[in-house]
Image (tube, rainbow, N blue to C red):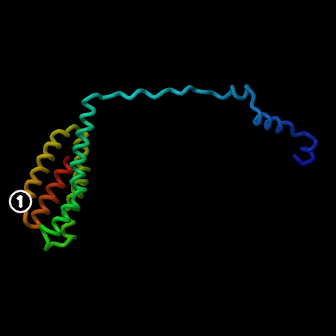
Amino acid sequence: MTRHDLEDGKDTEMEKINDTAKNPTNSTIEKVPVTPATPPAPVADGGVRAWLQVAGSFLVFSNLWGFVFAFGSFQSFYTLDYLPSESASDIAWIGTIGTGLLIFVGILSGPLFDLGYFRSMLIIGGVGETLAMFLLSLCTKYWQILLTQGIMVGLFNGKD
């Protein structure tokens, strides 16, 4: 199509398309299918049992991660008062091993929770972590603290 053809008005087909796009009529709007929006299903409230599970999960996670996040306080105490002959790097290994075991054992114990062994695992983990904390109070040497707070707490926290 040349410029001369456009000036003569031979491109009426193109003009019709442009006019329809600029001024849509009812016939063009009616051709578009409109599906009504369906409202989302109401969320079911699980009742007291569901909220008790939320509260229990909060307590378990605050126990696990709160103890890990508080290791800085332990490290400060160990470095300044309890084990001044040990370097800060050596003391940091206690928290590092505990956190690493928590995550590693947690990866392995996660499927057991999914299979329904959560009650026995929580009891074993809770009793084991409590035992580790009691034993930690008896520790006087670096290797004892490493075994109780690093390894025992890490293993039993990962089991929770």
Kindly identify the residue that appears in the image at 87 percent across and 40 percent down.
11
Most distant residue in the left direction: 138
- Rendered location of residue 117, percent (x, y): 19, 39
Query: Is residue 21 shown left or right of residue 89?
Result: right
In this figure, which residue is indicated by the disc labeled 1?
A: 138
Q: Is residue 96 left or right of residue 138?
A: right
Residue 41 pos. (x, y %): 43, 27
Q: Position of residue 12 (x, y in %)?
A: 86, 37
Q: Nearer the viewer, residue 89 or 125?
A: 89
In the rendered picture of this protein, how many numbered marks are placed on residues?
1
Q: Identify whether 31 is placed above or below 156.
A: above
Tell me which corner region of the image, top left, top right, bottom left or bottom right, holds residue 121: top left
- Return the x and y of residue 86 as percentages of the image width and height: 15, 72
Q: Is residue 37 left or right of residue 95?
A: right
For the point 75% across and 28% down, the residue is 25
Q: Amino acid at mark 1?
A: Leu
Picture quarter containing residue 71? bottom left
- Estimate how packed mark 1 is, as few (under 14), some (14 to 19) or many (20 or more) residues with alpha carbons within 10 Å: few
Residue at 77% of width from left, 33% of height from top? 23
Q: Secondary structure at mark 1?
A: loop
Front residue of 120/96: it is: 96
Identify the residue shown where x is 77% and y is 36%. Answer: 22
**Compared with residue 28, is residue 117 higher up or lower down, i.e. above or below?**
below
